[in-house]
Amino acid sequence: MISELLKIGLSPEEAKVYVACLEINGGAASTVAKKAGVNRVSCYHTLENLLKKRLLSQFVKNGIKYFSPEPPEQLLHLAEEKVNITKSLLPELHSLASAIAFKPKMRSYDGREGVEKIFEESLTAKGEILGYTNLQKVIEFSPKFFEHYTHTKLKKGIKTRYLSPNTLESVHVIDPFLPKKYDHNLIEILLVNKNQFLFENEILIFGNSVGIVSLNEDELLGVIIESPTYARTMKAVFDLAWLGATAFVAR
């Protein structure tokens, strides 16, 4: 019984003194201390703690303090009170946890499945996906997966802006992998000079994450970096590159 009382928040001496009070139906501090087998001086302190927890009550008779046990159901009330206090604290504790500075996370993957997993994760984007890509290499890497990825992205209504090297093959390379009907505003592609900007990796910027994957069969690996500040910085760099590419096309 003592061990169970410890689990609900009583100290070892509080448990002994409370049980002793129940067994003798209370009494003076010296009587309770003797029954509980604890030091008389420390017993006074323990009895005061049990009074504060409303597990005991007291009365004075002939100038002597007597302590009486409250019904055991008071233990249940005490436990319920702690649960209610904990529940009321949860919103504030959650807000404190979210207020702590975000710790960037980095996850690495390898192999074809690992690379595809990074593309799949970008489909959780709430906003647009920005990408430095090489459309020809992406499609050659995994045609069936790219078709699935593109169809899913368009079905979810996720907008994508791509910067890709301009080759003869890349001009219309994506066309066969698009649905027959889709919102053409969801995909924007700017083709850049392949001699100056030959992207061999795919960089995807979405939400608070940046995914980097190798499109080289000899080094199939990828990394996802979760960091709001890094993602915002990479988005700003992409927007700058997009403006430059737009100006170049306009000329």
Image (tube, rainbow, N blue to C red):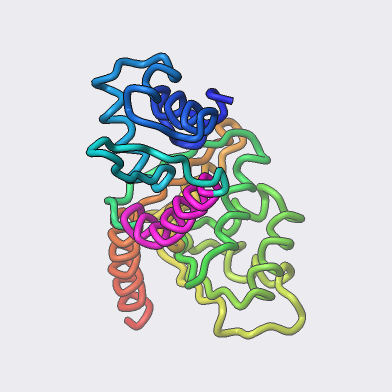
Q: Which of the two residues, 154 or 4, is positioned nearer the viewer here?
A: 4
Q: Is residue 200 visible?
A: no
Vertical relation: 133 (above or below) 46: below
Q: Along the line of sight, which residue is nearer the eye, 21 or 178?
A: 21
State whether residue 25 appears in this view: yes
Q: Look at the picture and state if 163 lies above or below 112.
A: below
Q: Nearer the viewer, residue 131 or 25?
A: 25
Q: Is residue 111 above or below residue 71?
A: above
Q: Is residue 171 left or right of residue 141?
A: left
The x and y percentages for residue 189 are 50, 72
Residue drawn at the location 35% of the way across and 60% of the way down: 92
Tell me which residue sits at (30%, 78%) in the image: 247
Residue at x 51% of width, y 76% of height: 188
Horizontal side, residue 156 vs residue 94: left or right:
right
95 up-or-down from 16: above or below: below
| Quarter of the rendering occupied by the N terminus | top right
x then y, percent, for residue 96: 31, 55
Residue 134, horizontal then vertical, whole percent: 53, 56
Residue 235, quarter of the rendered image: bottom left
Predominant secondary structure in magenta? helix
Residue at left offset 32%, top offset 30% = 46
Q: Name the side, left or right, on which 221 lies relative to 132.
A: right
User: In the rendered image, which quarter is residue 52 located in?
Assistant: top left
Work out which residue is located at the far front of the displayed protein and give it: 62
Range of magenta residues: 74-97
- Residue 221: x and y in percent read 54, 36
